[in-house]
Image (tube, rainbow, N blue to C red):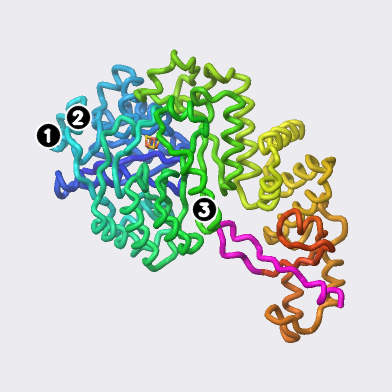
Amino acid sequence: MTYRLIAFNGRFIHSCLALFYVRAALEENLPGCNTDIAQYTINDPYYPTLLRIVSGEPAALFLSVYIWNSIYIQRLIGDLVKLLPGVPIILGGPQAVILAQNLSPDVSRRCTLVQGEIEGITKSFYKDLAGNRLQREYICEKAPEFKSPYIPNDFTGPLKNRTIYYESSRGCPFGCTYCLSASGKGVRHLSTSQVYEEIKSILRHAPKIIRFVDRTFNDLPERALDIWRFLVNQPGGTLFHFEMAPDRFSEDMLQFLEGVNPGRFQFEIGIQSTNPKTLESINRKCDLANLEPNVRKLLAMDSIHIHLDLILGLPYEDRESFVRSFADVFRLGAHYIQMGLLKVLPDTPMSKSIAEFGLVVCGSPPYEVLANRWLAKAELEELFWFGECVEAFHNNRFFRTLWDYLRKKNEDAAAFFQALLALCRGRGFFDLAHTQELMSSLLLELTRERSDGELCREILVFDWLRCGHHFLPGHLEKEPLSEHKKRLWSQLPQNWEGVYDYKNRDEFFKQSVFFRFSGKFLRDTGLADDNTGAYVCFPAQREDAVFKLNSFLFIPASLSES
Ligand code: SF4
């Protein structure tokens, strides 16, 4: 007799923490029971997945329902009740109530709804489950204690090759009106000693990534700093991901983060909008004056991947305001700018303001906004594609110098990406594979006629070579790279102190790429104060920084022109 615990994740590498909590609760309350964790993705083919779920005659099915999987699960339940008559189907998770409302009465009758945290569910649930007399609904009656649910075998079984999710606190101190966590009552933190013990036992299995799912990891800055201090002292190369409030970084935290090695931490920071009226209307408290200096300091470290979020479709955010929010965020220089559509989830405060804000919303999950009082359908659509364009071109390592250059010269970034979007549409970009070469050629086309067109071309060459390529694509090549190398081969001395000596000169040349950049390029990008231009060498080494770009070094004129 096996209880099958089922999740549908967005991607294979994700895992569903809730299933492990459910398993722990079942094993605690029904000692000796058999459980079986089954994780699929929402892209898995339907019929084989259905067959796998019903195989082996499970005694009950537990399904974890979220906004991203509720459509798949709704379809599935309709067939599960036919294939497994008499087998209880227990629905939990943040979208379970809404899903249950969408089921037909016949199907719904076969399901049991568990509302709230599994650790706080009344004990009668387990008795009823074992006795096969489940009620229609069980509710979490108190804010329970919780602890990490993982056991060692998970790491070679259901968690193998997946991201590990870990919760050191539950609940959120804020109340953003579009968020399901807004209805929570306060935050419960695990003691730091418990966190240390639990993390240590996870790290024994050397996972690649541990994502802290704490809704605001730094709501208590001192505690956050204590946990970080512990984490950086742990052996191994695990990357830790945190969701951070941008205005809750103390000076001590920022100072500490300066010493953290690249690849150890990454932060997701919700900005959502830089329009104070918008932030006020969604009840998002953020000290904008603190935000900018904090994020700038974090970015200047170039050791922590910084992901900044904006939301498209918020109240009081018209086209001009959204574009300004984007420009504000672009100016900060984030590694990743996400512009997600507002989702108006049932039972959130936002869903009660549909009329007030003139929200037009998709009828099924994930309930994206289609228009509102400030953005007509066509305007919202335009801004959505604008976000897709930023996603494709900006959110990678391909063109970092170009973005820095635009920032340096205070370019109107929104206008730049709008022009890029128009070009992309004209060239059918969104139907094509988004290769670096294609994007680079579009950027060249966009900038070619500008007064700084030649400089932009050099920047694109530099960015291309920083990505470790040993050739130039046709649109960037005026002269083969081999010609630059040939010239330097005859000009550079047998020994270049600190770089090569006569014994490894051949190898150095074999592995390196060379290009001559103009003085204007060097000056205007801020790379060197040089009017005459210089050869730049790209040896086969990566930088120890967020994007791990190819390193580079200038070849002094005294060497190359000797
Ligand atoms: S801070 Fe994040 S988790 Fe908390 S209410 Fe706002 S959106 Fe939700």
Does the closest atom of ligand 1 sit within 8 Å of the Cβ of label 3?
Answer: no
- Ligand 1 in which quarter: top left
What amino acid type is highlighted by mark number 3? Lys
Instruction: Kindly identify the residue that appears in the image at 82 percent across and 59 percent down.
Output: 518
User: Which residue is label 3 attached to?
Assistant: 297
Chain-order first, disc 2 or disc 1: 1
What amino acid type is highlighted by mark number 2? Tyr
Are the residues flagged by discs 2 and 1 in contact, CB closer than 8 Å?
A: yes
Give the numbered dot on residue 124. 1
Give the numbered dot on residue 138. 2
Whether the magenta-drawn stretch holds residue 549 is answered as yes
Chain-order first, disc 2 or disc 3: 2
Q: Residues within 10 Å of mark 1 (few under 14, many from 20)?
A: few
Q: Nearer the viewer, residue 523 or 187?
A: 523
Label 1: which secondary element: helix
At which x and y percent is residue 537?
Answer: 74, 68
Q: From where the camera sits, is residue 44 visible?
A: no
